[in-house]
Amino acid sequence: MNRLEYAALDALPAAIARPARAAPPATGIVHFGPGAFHRAHQASYIDTLLDGDPSWGIAAVSLRSAGTVEALSAQQGLYTLAIRDAAPGFRVIGAHSRFLGPDDAAETQALLADAEVKLVTTTVTEKGYCLAADGSLDLAHPDVVHDLAAPAVPRSVIGWIVGGLTARRAAGTPPFVMMPCDNLANNGAKVKAALVAFAAATDADLAAWIEARVLVPGTMVDSITPASDSALYETVAAALGVEDRAAVQREAFTQWVIEDVGSPVCAALARAGATLTDNVAGYEQAKLRVLNGSHSTLAYAGLLRGHASVSEAMGDAALASFVDAMIREDIIPTLQPVAGLDHNAYREAVLARFRNPAIVHRLDQIAADGSQKIPYRLGDTLAAHRARGEMPQHVVIALGCWVAFLMQRAHAGVPILDPAAAALAAAAAEGDAATVLDRLIAAKLGFSGELAGDPAAVAAIAAAAQAAFDGDWAMLSSD
């Protein structure tokens, strides 16, 4: 079977959307971390933008391994985006122009210095920014230590970006816009502070220039993107009639929220469908509490009730109704108003996404790392209500389900996937739910130490946890 490439576009079935271009576009963006999410999400926006302006092509840079960029290069940057939804579809994306791996440092450096590059984006996961627990740059991180001592070929994305900005400043070239696209709270401010701190370690004048001149807008991104697998490749080959080993898949819903910093770069992305706002934090809060909080609730309660995936859990009428009520009654009242964001419409969209049977989002994957996720996904909502003297019954039950999940796993000897796995298993292995919860609070595992000073909330969570562990699910339908 022939491989997907520009020469094959005209022969694709008429129903397959494809670029109108006959060759890769010119490079205007450098992107670090061209994994599936970037290719399914940001690159689809850029592909739309390229329809009207061919100068926005993406140079894909992989710092750790060459597999993805080699697969893209073999297909001239083309790949298929499969939409998994009630109305499935296929679209060939042609947004990428260059393909650089770990051995292409000189070419990457040249691109970062190139005045034609207007934007640098990143999807390197939260840990890829080498930040300390307080969100500042970890100057003791091995990659940062290396880059400060030997900046010619950096290991960290922060080192790469500062290196590019150093070259542009020396040449009198205006800085590019730096745009982190990982779901790290307040990502723009944190990444800019990291760039300034890195530069300040060796060059105070450079640090001042970055502080004054470099725009780092905050962002929020969202779209469920399952991993590519052999089944996807077979489906794409059958639909297109050509082989595509770089295909990706996602749900139809996609969201790219960008802080409006007054840059033409941001305005261009808005033309492609991104949302510009002066309140990224409001969107982040809604996503964390509505989508992520509900996801975690479905994961822990769903696993305890014998379900395996999100769509399967949403087929459980009692559980689906409970989650809907939790969003309406407990979560939305705690959200700050955001211009352009209708919280009830967002709730409906989230629940519709959860019901999508074409996306198999496993509950055990969502359940991982609970000690790190629970404080933000559910704990903040609890705290907001308790500050008003209210007891959010649905959130209390959701938190109890996490405790019961830990107890169930620990009693069964099933591994808990969490950075604090050993401590969580030890806390949950013996005793009733109240005892386990006291241990978790004392160790600050998923719960703040301040919760110990709120005996009413502790008792309510413990009661819900014991009921869930015992399989008493009458609480899901309680008023």
Image (spheres, rainbow, N blue to C red):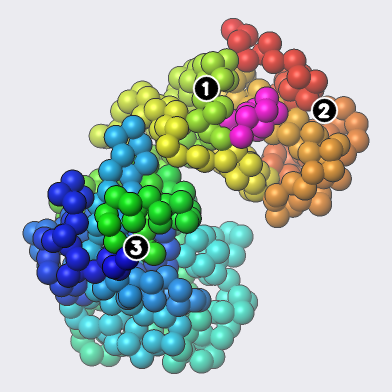
Which residue is the site of mark 1?
A: 315
Q: In the displayed structure, does residue 145 sit left or right of residue 35?
A: right
Of residue 147 and residue 103, the one placed in the foreground of this image is 103
**Count of marks, rendered view:** 3
**Circle nearer the viewer, 3 or 2:** 3
Expressed as whole percent of the image width and height from the top left, the position of residue 412 reads: 84, 38
Task: Determine if residue 479 is in view.
Answer: yes
- How much space separates mark 3 and mark 1, taking CA atoms? 34 Å
Q: In the displayed structure, does residue 101 sit left or right of residue 406?
A: left
Q: Amino acid at mark 3?
A: Asp
Q: State the image quarter where residue 399 is shown.
A: top right
**Circle nearer the viewer, 1 or 2:** 1
Query: Is residue 348 covered in magenta?
Result: no
Q: Which residues are magenta?
A: 298-308
**What element does badge 3 sit on?**
loop
Which residue is the site of mark 2?
A: 433
